[in-house]
Structures are given as C-alpha cells and as structure tokens.
Image (cartoon, grey):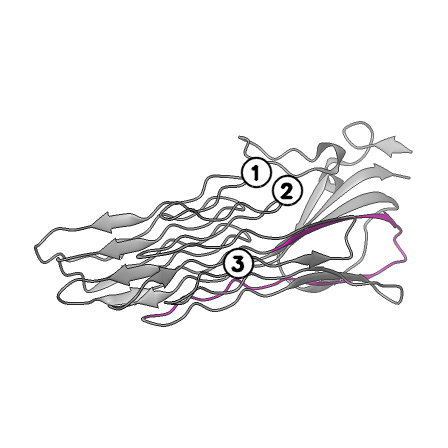
Amino acid sequence: MAVLGGAAPSNLWQIPITYSQDWVPPANGTAIFHLIGAGGAGDGNGGSGNAGGGGAGGYARKSYTVTTSQSYAIAIGAGGLGSGNATGGNGGHTTVTLTGVGPTITANGGTGGSGSAAGTGGAASNGDVNRTGGNGSLTSGGCGGAVGIYTNGEGAANNYAGSSDVQSPFMSPSYGFLSGGGRGGKTTFERSGGEETGPMRGENGEFLAGGGGVHTRNGYYAEQMAGFGGIGGGGGGAYSDSNKPPTSIGGNGGDGIVIIQYLTVS
C-alpha cells in the first residue's frame, strides 16, 4: 500500500468534481470525499426595506474504501442566481451515493436572501462530519455566509461577509483535510450626490467565503450588482435608497463542488 506523496501517482492526490456525473474510482484505495452545497443568492432591492445576503452551502466529509469496480452517483448543486429587484435564488444540493449501496451523503444548498430576511445556511447529513453553512446578514446591502469545515460556517455580520475557517495560501491534499479558504467580501457604499455611469459592484468572496453587498444613496447609478459568493458561499444583497433607484441585482451564490482526496492506493 502506498501513501500519497510517495509512490502514488500525483494525479490521484486531489480530484475536483465540478459537474454532475457517475464517477468511477481510477484506483483502489482509501479516499476522502468532501461535499460542499451551493450558496444562495443575495436579494436585489431597488428602493424599500433591506437586501438580505444569501446563506452558504453545507459541508459533509465521508471516508470510503474505493475500488475500480464501484460507481458513485455525484450531483453538484448550482449556485442561486441573483436578479434585478427580486429575491435571491436558493442554492442547489450536492450529493454522493455509492451506487447500489447508499446511503446518500448530502450537503444542502443555502437559501436566497430577501428584502425581509437573510438567507440561511444549508445543513448536511450522513457524512462522518457534517457542518451547516453560515447565514447571510440583513442590512441595506447585506452580505453572504461562508462554508464551515472545522465548525459550522461563519455567518455574515452586518456589512461583512462570512470568511472561511481554513484560510491559507494554498490547498494541501495531505491527510484528507481541506485548506486554501479565503476572505469574505464587504459591502461597497456610495453616497455621492451626483450622477454616475456605474455599474457599482460589491466585493466577491474568495474560496468558501461569502460575497459583499452594495448600497447606493443619493447618487444615481444605472445598475448595481452585489458581490458573488466563492465556492459554496452566499451572494451579497444589492440595495438603493437613491432618488433615482437603479436596477439592483443580488450577487450569485457560489456553485457546489465535490473534492476527492486519495489517502492511500493499493
């Protein structure tokens, strides 16, 4: 039996799955499956109330003894879509099922934000480890929640999106843990009294983190769009209380993903 980093082929160290498929292991061994649900989108609000940020997707971690004769049904959740002056869409669920055996491992998507409520983080089930994603915030330009790996995801706090709890400058496949998470975005404010060409944008979230919101006041922008969530992160909310409300588009939630890390091959 070879431990990865020694005699094992380097292309087996870490396998990202970004679209739904029936996955057949390329080698026998022990592998860790990391499932991340998709983030919900933020609200787009053109002139009344608040604009809630989206909730982050859940996270599940599962160890399998894999063989080349198996097949795994993998479904990847799509990030919720933000739209103009409308409630944010919900994030899709990410699932893995060992075909013919089960059970289904699930990382649920986060819900979208609205003008009256922030999005909530998705739960997870049937993993060896299950975490709930962070909630968005409800403000005039709310922010998205983050995916949690070691604990439940960090929720957005007012005008700051949730950040990953596994921040580091690189992703290491060692020992079956994820790293490389990033910082959440923050709300972009504009309170000038003039007419601007725009568009105004909120800050995008980094890997596993939430997107920032956007809030314009007094001035005029033809369009404003909140920041997108990173993988699994919730999108930011877009709000305007200007005298000429623009089209306010909530930020999209981040797509889900499955990351498979071989620990050993045999």
Query: Residue drawn at (18%, 61%), measured in percent from left and top?
Result: 221
Local secondary structure at mark 2: loop
- The circle on residue 151 is 2
Q: Residues within 10 Å of mark 2 (few under 14, many from 20)?
A: some
- Residue 126 screen position, x and y as percent: 78, 57
Residue 47 on the magenta segment: no
Q: Is residue 164 visible?
A: yes
> What residue is disc 3 on?
39
Local secondary structure at mark 3: loop
- Residue 233 screen position, x and y as percent: 51, 52
Residue numbers of the magenta segment: 58-84
> The disc labelled 2 sits on which kind of residue?
Thr
Q: CA distance from mark 2 to mark 1?
A: 8 Å
> The disc labelled 1 sits on which kind of residue?
Asp
| Pointers 3 and 1 in contact (C-beta within 8 Å) | no
Q: CA distance from mark 3 to mark 2?
A: 17 Å
Query: Residue drawn at (61%, 58%), measured in percent from left and top?
Result: 37
Q: Quadrant of residue 177?
A: top right
Query: Residue drawn at (9%, 58%), measured in percent from left and top?
Result: 195
- Residue 45 screen position, x and y as percent: 31, 67
> What residue is disc 1 on?
165
> The disc labelled 3 sits on which kind of residue?
Gly
Q: Is residue 17 visible?
A: no
Observer-side mark, 2 or 1, equals: 2
Observer-side mark, 3 or 2, equals: 2
Q: Residues within 10 Å of mark 1 (few under 14, many from 20)?
A: many
Q: Quadrant of the C terminus?
A: top right
- The circle on residue 137 is none
